Amino acid sequence: MQGESGFHRRKCPFVFFRIREVAKRGWFVAAICRMTSPYRADPGSCNHGRVPVYRDEGVVLRTTPLAEADRIITVLTRRNGRVRAVAKGVRKTSSRFGSRLEPGTYVDLMLHSGRSLDTVTQADIISPYGTTIALDYARHTAAAVMLETAERLTSEERQPALRLFLLLVGGLRTLAAGKRPAPLVLDAFLLRSLAVSGYGMALDDCARCGEPGQHLSLSVAGGGVVCPQCRPHGAASVSAGAVRLLTDLLRGDWDGALASEARARREAGGIVAAYLQWHLERGLRALPHLERA
Ligand SMILES: [Zn+2]
């Protein structure tokens, strides 16, 4: 069977079944294969029953020039996680893709599976968030941090990340609507995307011992607020207003968040940035350009 390496045969429980039964019940096996998308982690050696052409929707995170006229686009898709695909001829003025594959654009894609990279065969805009957001510098820089964070939080390609995808689409939609302050939209996205990726910030109980109560010390390395007994060296003092704002942003309580004071917003923004940098281990390229009102 073409493309099925020993590596994949060992790893994938359905391959044995597939080899035996494929002639008799091919459609059934293909359905099982499609349901076990985690095994798509190694698309190079086995396409695991994936149809060569597939459709998915996603947000373009980044584009990289390739050869003279092509681009590699990195997309966070709804069903397939982060995917990299070649868009051929996209840099020509006559390109049939036009500006549909710019960062921040929410697109419906037809892709052709390849051994290492897929190829975009069709792209239709669902929402051109990137174009709308680009008109305003504060929103544009916030969106850039969101796109880069989404890429960094999906460290492995083709690992479905539906909650992160939904947070990203929601965050870009809110930024594009322009009704809420960009720094707050960004901080809400960062706190929530870190939380769905397993880095939730503790804001009620002590991050170390679980002691309930309102704690006004915060340790970025410790994972959130800490009680006086657990407070490590280097923990920062934090105001009650900032803790309340962080809690509102994490929960999506916009009435509470919009009632916050400018000082609490600045403080919360600094904490979120430090927390993000800590968890992503090295600095995000877009973060220094961020304009905080
Ligand atoms: Zn404690």
Image (tube, rainbow, N blue to C red):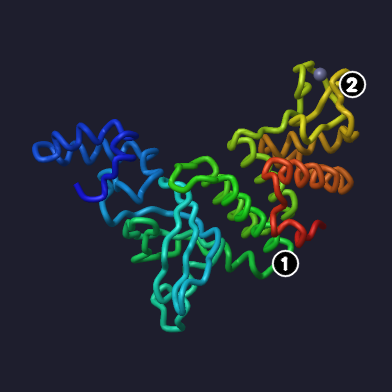
**In the shown orientation, is residue 147 left or right of residue 127?**
right
Q: CA distance from mark 1 to mark 2?
A: 41 Å
Q: Earlier in the sequence, mark 1 or mark 2?
A: 1
Residue at image point 10% right, 40% down: 23
Q: Position of residue 43 (x, y in %)?
A: 36, 49
Q: Residue at (54%, 45%) from the top-left corner? A: 155
Q: Nearer the viewer, residue 256 or 226?
A: 226
Is the residue indicated by label 2 positioned so its CB lies within 8 Å of ligand 1? Answer: yes
Q: Residue furthest bottom?
A: 93
Q: Is residue 245 or residue 210 the one in the foreground?
A: 210
> Residue at image x 74%, y 34%?
247
- Identify the residue at horizontal 78%, vertical 60% (top origin): 291
In this rendering, the label closer to the viewer, 1 or 2 = 2
Relative to 242, does residue 222 appear above or below in the rendering?
above
- Which residue carries the number 2 mark? 228
According to the picture, the residue beneath numbered tag 1 turns out to be 137
Under circle 1, the secondary element is helix
Image quarter where ligand 1 lies: top right
Relative depth, front residue between 48 and 271? 48
Tags 1 and 2 touching, CB below 8 Å = no
Q: Position of residue 157 (x, y in %)?
A: 47, 48
Helix, strand or loop at disc 2?
loop
* Residue 197 x %, y %: 59, 37
Q: Amino acid at mark 1?
A: Tyr
Crowd around label 2: few <14 · some 14–19 · many ≥20 (10 Å): few
Q: Is residue 196 above or below residue 84?
A: above
Residue situated furthest front in the rendering: 6
The dot on residue 21 is none
In the rendered view, does 260 fall on the left or right side of 54?
right
* Amino acid at the residue labelled 2: Pro
Residue that extends furthest to the left in the rendered view of this protein: 24
